[in-house]
Image (cartoon, rainbow, N blue to C red):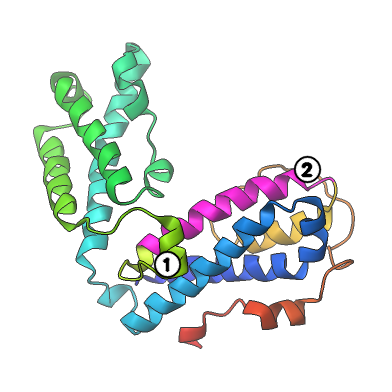
Amino acid sequence: MTDREIDFANMARLTYRELTDQRPQWEQRSPDMVADFEQLNNFLQAFDEVATRTGGKGAKEYTDTKDRAEHAAEVAAGRIVRGLRVLQLSVKNPALANVASYTPSSLNPLHGQELLEALNAIASAAAGVAPLLANEGVTDEHLKSLDDAIALYTSLVDVPNNDNAVAQGAALQGSARQVVKGMRNVLHRLDVRIDNLRDEIPGLAQRYDDARRTDTNYVPQSTGPREGGDGSDGGIGREAAGDAFGPEPKPFQ
């Protein structure tokens, strides 16, 4: 697994710890949030299982063929999508609207068959406007690179795209990358739920933001001055929350 994946899991653990501390407050106001909270814990445990299985190898020892194939496909698709977006600036083509809307952040959470569908849609759209893309710097080599990446990834996809299964450990033959993708999805749902509680529990929102900001890509849903203290009132205490599931990754202590 990569250093980036380890760092992301550390951020998720810190976020989980803050939510554990403040659970008496947010659960009363948003009981549906419990499912996402518990799923985050499931993904954290799944990540530790994968880390234990791989021996905690860092980025220099990262050799998972499937993960590398998935990453290569996303990179190849990203170059083509940038060209498709440029084409949409001059001539609005409804047939390209969907694939031109893809971004690295929207492709990254996808996995397995879901990702393959998006990649194939991008490749198909690009093939239909190849001469126009050439004017935007997207060469035949770029198109072939995506086709080759799709072919390789297709041959390696053998685990259904089932976040719940991964979270529960039923598909732990998956990789850290797959688990982190699921973790990212559930954190995005929690971002929305916390944003809805900002006025009622401003201290929780502050502490949640502080934990999530250890991920450099995190952008709070809302900005502006916050009032209401640090969120300590009504919590179970950070020490107790840490005992529930601390922010340090267990396999790497």
167 or 147, which is in the foreground?
167
Between disc 2 and disc 1, the foreground one is 1
Residue tagged by mark 1? 5
Residue tagged by mark 2? 224
Which SS class for mark 1? Answer: helix
Q: Main secondary structure of the magenta part?
A: helix
- Residue reaching furthest to the bottom: 253
Range of magenta residues: 178-199
Q: Where residue 249 sits: x, y (%)?
A: 52, 79
Residue occupying image coordinates x 18% and y 22%: 135
How far, Cα to Cα, is label 2 from label 1?
A: 30 Å
Q: Is 103 left, or right, of 12 in this rendering? A: left
**Is residue 56 shown to the viewer in this render?**
no
Q: Earlier in the sequence, mark 2 or mark 1?
A: 1
Q: Where residue 103 sits: x, y (%)?
A: 39, 38
Q: Is 1 left, or right, of 198 in this rendering? A: left
Which SS class for mark 2? Answer: loop
Q: Is residue 44 above or below residue 224?
A: below
The picture quadrant where one finds residue 59 is bottom left
Quadrant in which the N terminus appears: bottom left
